[in-house]
Image (spheres, rainbow, N blue to C red):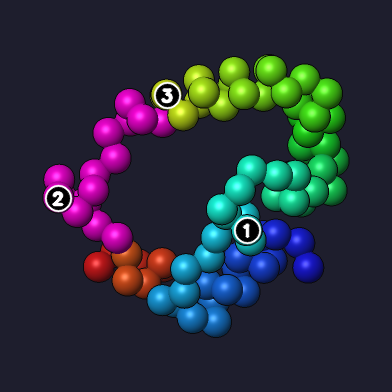
C-alpha cells in the first residue's frame, strides 16, 4: 500500500483519526522518503538530496522559515482544528 492510499484509508475509516505523514515521527530517518522514491515524479529529487545532505538541510531551513511566515490561524487567533478532516467545524 502506498502512502497516499494508507492516509486515505486512515481518514476514511475514522474521521477523528490522526494520521502521521511519517509512521515514526520521533526521529529523522529515510523511511518517509522511500514512498517519494517509489514515484517517478520525485525520485530524482530524492536522489539529489540523498547525495547532497547540505543542500537538503539548507533547503529545509529555507522552507520552514517561509512556512513560519504564512500566518497560520491557530485556535487562539480564530483558526480551528477540524474534528472531521473533511469539513470545517
How many other residues sit within 10 Å of disc 1, few (<14), some (14-19) or many (≥20)?
few
Q: Which residues are magenta?
A: 67-81
Residue 35 against residue 70 in the figure, above or below: below
Residue 36 against residue 48 in the figure, above or below: below
Badge 2 marks a residue whose secondary structure is helix
Quadrant where the image shows the N terminus:
bottom right
Q: Position of residue 51 (x, y in %)?
A: 83, 23
Disc 3 from disc 1: Cα separation: 24 Å
For the point 29% across and 40% down, the residue is 72
Q: Quadrant of residue 36?
A: top right
Q: Is residue 40 left or right of residue 64?
A: right
**Viewer-proximal residue, 10 or 25?**
25
Disc 3 from disc 2: Cα separation: 21 Å
How many other residues sit within 10 Å of disc 3, few (<14), some (14-19) or many (≥20)?
few
Q: Which residue is mark 2?
A: 76
Is residue 68 on the magenta stretch?
yes
Q: Which residue is mark 1?
A: 24
**Viewer-proximal residue, 26 or 58?**
26
Callout 3 touching callout 1 (CB < 8 Å):
no
Q: Position of residue 42 (x, y in %)?
A: 77, 37
Q: Position of residue 10 (x, y in %)?
A: 57, 73
Q: Position of residue 87 (x, y in %)?
A: 35, 67
For the point 33% across and 26% down, the residue is 69
Disc 2 from disc 1: Cα separation: 29 Å
* Residue 44 in sight from this viewpoint: no
Badge 1 marks a residue whose secondary structure is loop
Amino acid at each position: 500500500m502506498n502512502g497516499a492510499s494508507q492516509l486515505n484509508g486512515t481518514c476514511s475509516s475514522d474521521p477523528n483519526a490522526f494520521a502521521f505523514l511519517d509512521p515514526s515521527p520521533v526521529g529523522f530517518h529515510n523511511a518517509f522518503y522511500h514512498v517519494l522514491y517509489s514515484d517517478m515524479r520525485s525520485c530524482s529529487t530524492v536522489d539529489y538530496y540523498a547525495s547532497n545532505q547540505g543542500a537538503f538541510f539548507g533547503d529545509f531551513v529555507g522552507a520552514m522559515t517561509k512556512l513560519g511566515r504564512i500566518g497560520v490561524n491557530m485556535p487562539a487567533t480564530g483558526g480551528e482544528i477540524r474534528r472531521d478532516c473533511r469539513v470545517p467545524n
